[in-house]
Image (cartoon, grey):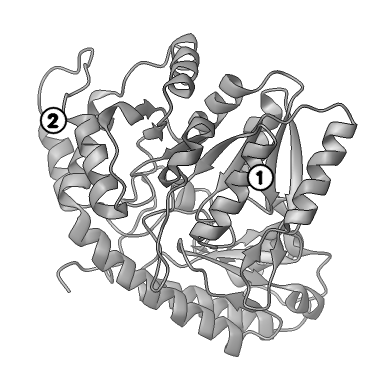
C-alpha cells in the first residue's frame, strides 16, 4: 500500500467539528468527516499558493471546468461538455439555491426518508414544505422505495392544494448507504417527469461505491436532462469539508439559465482562489489515493459490521453499498439499556461509554430506533470505539463511566 491510512493523528485543537465539540476522551464516530490526512499534493499546493503575498479578487481558471469534465468522463464514464458545469458554494447551500430556483414559497419538495438532515433544513428555512415518502428497509438492510406509496403521497399533497415542483434525491443514500442502480434511478426520473417534477440529485458520496456496485449519476439519463440537476463536489471524496466548494451538473440550457439567475441574485461569485486550486489538485492528483482509500474503507466497513453483529447484542448493522457510514438497527440495545429511544441511547453512549455516534431519529421518518456509525477512521481507532460500544452495551442498565 502506497498510502498510510493507519496513522492516528491528534485533531483536537484544530477547530474540528468532529473532535472539538466532544468531551476529552470521547471517540467520535459520528459526523461524515474522515480521520485521514488530506492528499499531500493538496497540502503542498495550498501552502505554495498561501506563500504568495497577494490574495486579491480571483478569476476562474480556464482549466477548472475541463478538470471537472475529465473527472466525470474517466471516473463515471459520462462524457459532458464544460458548459454542463456551474460552480457552487457547497452542497447544502447549492441545494438551498435549487429550492429558490425551482420552487415558490409555500410549495412542497419531495424527499425520501430517512435522509440527510440538512435536506429538511433547506426546504423549511426557505418557506417550503417537506413532502416525505418513507423508504422501506429490506431484509438485507437496503432501502427501497415503494412506487405505489410514492404516487399516493404525491396525490395526497396535491389534494391539499400543494404544488410539488421539486424533489431531492440522495444518491448514494445517506444515512442508509444504498447505491441506486440504473433501474431505480430511471423509475424515479420517469415518475418525476410524468408529474412535472424537477430532480435535484445530491451525489456527494458518489466516489465511495464498493464492488460489485457501480455509481450511476442521475445526469447520465439524457432523456431526462430537462428535469435533472446534480449537486456534488470533491469535499467528501478527499476529506476537505472545511473548504466550501461544490459544483452543479446541468445538461439543459433552460435549467442552467434559471440556476445562473439565482446564483447572480444571491451574489454568488466564482470560487475563491483556494477552493478552485483544491478541487483541481485533488481531481488531477488523487485517483490512486482515492482508490486505495476505498479499499481501506471497505475493509473497515466489513470488519466493523461483523464486530457489531457478533459482539454487541441488540445492534443489527447493515453493510452499506456506498459511503462509509454504517446504518444499524438499535431497538434491542435501546431496550437492553432501558433507554427511551435512540436519542437517549446516543447520549448515554457518549456520556458513559465515551463514544459519540448519531441517533437515527434526526434523519426523519424511518430513522427512529436506528443509529449511524462512521467507519472512516484508522482501523485501530475505529476498533477502540467499537470495543467501547461493546463494553458499554454489556454493562448494567444504568452503568457509569468506563
Q: Residue at x 11, y 19 (%)?
A: 53
Q: CA distance from mark 2 to mark 1?
A: 47 Å
Q: Position of residue 393 (x, y in %)?
A: 67, 80
Badge 2 density bin: few <14, some 14–19, many ≥20, Cα 10 Å: some
- At 16% across and 24% down in the image, what residue appears? 62
Q: Which mark is residue 221?
A: none
> Would residue 190 be found to the left or right of residue 128 on screen?
left
Q: Nearer the viewer, residue 383 or 166?
A: 166
Q: Residue furthest right?
A: 160
| Quadrant assignment, res 326 | bottom right
Of 388 and 109, the residue lying toward us? 109
Instruction: Place residue 280 in its image quadrant.
Output: top left
Image position of 52 (left or right of 3): left
Q: Could you tell me which residue is drawn at 70 percent across and 39 percent down?
A: 110
* Disc sitting over residue 191 in the figure: 1
Q: Residue at x 60, y 23 (%)?
A: 102
The reply, left or right, for residue 96 in relation to residue 398 is left
Residue 126, image quadrant: top right
**Location of the N terminus (image quadrant):** bottom left
Instruction: Name the disc covering residue 49, or none.
Output: 2
Mark 1 residue crowding within 10 angstroms, few (<14) / some (14–19) / many (20+)? some
Front-most of residues 26 and 135: 135
Amino acid at each position: 500500500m502506497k498510502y498510510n491510512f493507519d496513522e492516528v493523528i491528534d485533531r483536537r485543537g484544530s477547530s474540528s467539528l468532529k473532535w472539538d465539540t466532544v468531551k476529552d476522551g470521547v471517540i467520535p464516530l459520528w459526523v461524515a468527516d474522515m480521520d485521514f490526512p488530506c492528499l499531500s499534493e493538496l497540502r503542498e499546493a495550498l501552502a505554495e499558493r498561501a506563500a504568495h503575498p497577494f490574495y486579491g479578487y480571483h478569476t476562474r481558471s480556464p482549466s477548472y471546468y475541463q478538470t471537472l469534465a475529465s473527472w466525470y468522463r474517466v471516473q463515471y464514464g459520462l462524457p459532458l461538455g464544460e458548459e454542463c458545469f456551474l460552480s457552487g458554494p457547497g452542497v447544502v447551500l447549492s441545494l438551498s439555491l435549487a429550492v429558490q430556483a425551482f420552487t415558490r414559497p409555500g410549495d412542497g419538495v419531495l424527499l425520501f426518508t430517512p435522509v440527510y438532515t440538512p435536506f429538511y433544513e433547506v426546504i423549511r428555512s426557505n418557506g417550503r414544505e417537506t413532502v416525505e415518502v418513507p423508504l422501506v428497509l429490506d431484509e438485507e438492510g437496503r432501502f427501497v422505495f415503494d412506487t405505489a406509496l410514492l404516487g399516493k403521497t404525491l396525490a395526497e399533497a396535491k389534494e391539499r392544494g400543494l404544488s410539488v415542483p421539486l424533489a431531492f434525491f440522495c444518491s448514494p443514500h445517506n444515512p442508509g448507504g444504498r447505491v441506486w442502480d440504473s433501474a431505480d434511478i430511471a423509475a424515479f426520473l420517469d415518475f418525476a417527469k410524468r408529474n412535472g417534477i424537477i430532480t435535484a440529485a445530491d451525489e456527494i458520496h458518489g466516489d465511495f461505491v464498493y464492488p460489485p456496485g457501480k455509481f450511476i449519476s442521475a445526469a447520465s439519463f439524457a432523456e431526462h436532462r430537462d428535469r435533472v440537476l446534480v449537486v456534488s463536489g470533491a469535499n467528501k471524496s478527499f476529506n476537505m469539508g472545511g473548504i466550501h466548494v461544490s459544483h452543479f451538473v446541468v445538461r439543459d440550457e433552460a435549467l442552467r439559465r434559471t440556476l445562473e439567475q439565482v446564483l447572480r441574485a444571491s451574489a454568488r461569485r466564482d470560487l475563491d482562489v483556494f477552493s478552485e486550486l483544491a478541487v483541481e489538485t485533488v481531481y488531477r492528483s488523487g485517483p490512486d489515493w482515492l482508490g486505495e482509500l476505498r479499499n481501506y474503507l471497505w475493509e473497515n466497513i466489513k470488519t466493523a459490521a461483523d464486530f457489531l453483529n457478533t459482539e454487541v447484542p441488540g445492534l443489527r448493522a447493515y453493510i452499506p453499498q456506498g459511503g462509509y457510514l454504517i446504518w444499524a438497527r438499535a431497538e434491542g440495545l435501546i431496550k437492553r439499556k432501558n433507554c427511551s429511544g435512540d436519542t437517549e441511547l446516543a447520549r448515554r453512549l457518549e456520556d458513559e461509554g465515551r463514544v459519540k455516534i448519531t441517533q437515527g431519529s434526526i434523519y426523519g421518518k424511518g430513522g427512529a430506533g436506528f443509529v449511524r456509525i462512521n467507519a472512516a477512521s484508522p482501523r485501530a481507532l475505529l476498533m477502540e470505539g467499537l470495543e467501547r460500544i461493546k463494553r458499554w452495551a454489556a454493562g448494567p442498565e444504568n452503568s457509569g463511566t468506563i
